[in-house]
Image (tube, rainbow, N blue to C red):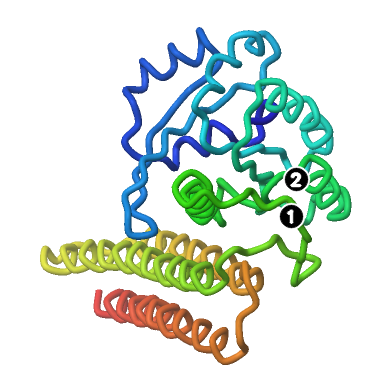
Amino acid sequence: MGEPDVGKSTFNKYCSMRFEDTTEQLHEQVYGVSFAVKILKNINIEIALVVWNFTGQERYKTLQPHYMFGVSGILLLFDLTRKETFEKLVDWVQFIRKNDVDVPIFLIGSKADLFYQKAIDDAEIEQFVNTNKLQGYYEVSFKTGLNVEFVIQKMAELIYKVKIQNEKLPTEFKLERPFPDRPIIINEQAVLSEYILTLRTVFDMVFNEISNRISILEQFVEDIRKTSGKIDKREVFEEIEEISVDLASHNKKIQELFGLPPVPITRELKESLVNEWKQKRDKLLYRILVFKDVVNFMEKLE
């Protein structure tokens, strides 16, 4: 639940086994609720989560109470960069309490990737969670996937404890932010692993793209040589210059990724990753340099 454009529909896209798109879109258009299903194998049992996405548009408020019956848990979303979406949460809590729903409720701050634009103080968030007796607060980014899967798992675990093990809902909350300038990370080790995997994927994508372009150009020049044709050095050098510019652009973006890790990393790990990329980049630069020398040599032979 939450106001429009806080990420509710995007959250649904993370849920697998979606209903047919046309059916879901029609259902949301008519009733103001869309849905998706996600299967989680958790706590040694299989949990099926049916995710209902309540639209934030006012005209659907009278229809939506029908969908509160049987709800097992609620994610209450707001946009970290737009305070008005946080202030509107009071209305959503009243809507929930009005329908006598006593289930786990997590407050979710979306757009954690734009944390530097955060418009709500931590003190306000902590007070809201405790005043309304919610069960926790998490920050997610649907753009980067930060914490999304972990929030689903946390909700599944709490639902299991409440519904199956008959535990009481926790109502005391303390917001602890290890790093004031960063979003809260649920599982730092997992996020770090994803960060490293992402970097290496980018390394390989850039290396393969540039390498393939150089190979195509090399083959083009080789074909001309085999047919004893004349090489248009200006045209070839323009193409290789374009490749060099693109490589420099990719390199700049990768350097930015090094400077903005989602969690703190050790100097040794950063240096290792930097060197890993540097070796790939230098191989490409060397191929470009050798290729230029070959073209110059072929021109002299002509």
Q: Would you say 134 lies left or right of 263 here?
A: right
* Count of numbered circles in the view: 2
The location of residue 32, given as percent across then percent down, is: 56, 15
The location of residue 114, given as percent across then percent down, is: 71, 51
Answer yes or no: is residue 145 visible.
no
Residue found at x 49% / y 27%: 70
The location of residue 142, given as percent across then percent down, is: 56, 46
The location of residue 26, given as percent across then percent down, is: 43, 11
- The secondary element bearing badge 2 is classed as loop
Identify which amino acid the numbered label 1 is placed on.
Phe
Q: Residues within 10 Å of mark 1 (few under 14, many from 20)?
A: some
The quadrant where residue 116 appears: bottom right
Q: Which residue is mark 2?
A: 80
Residue 115 marker: 1
* Vertical position of residue 282 compared to residue 2: above or below: below
Mark 2 touching mark 1, by CB under 8 A?
A: yes
- The secondary element bearing badge 1 is classed as helix
Distance (Cα) linking label 2 and label 1? 7 Å
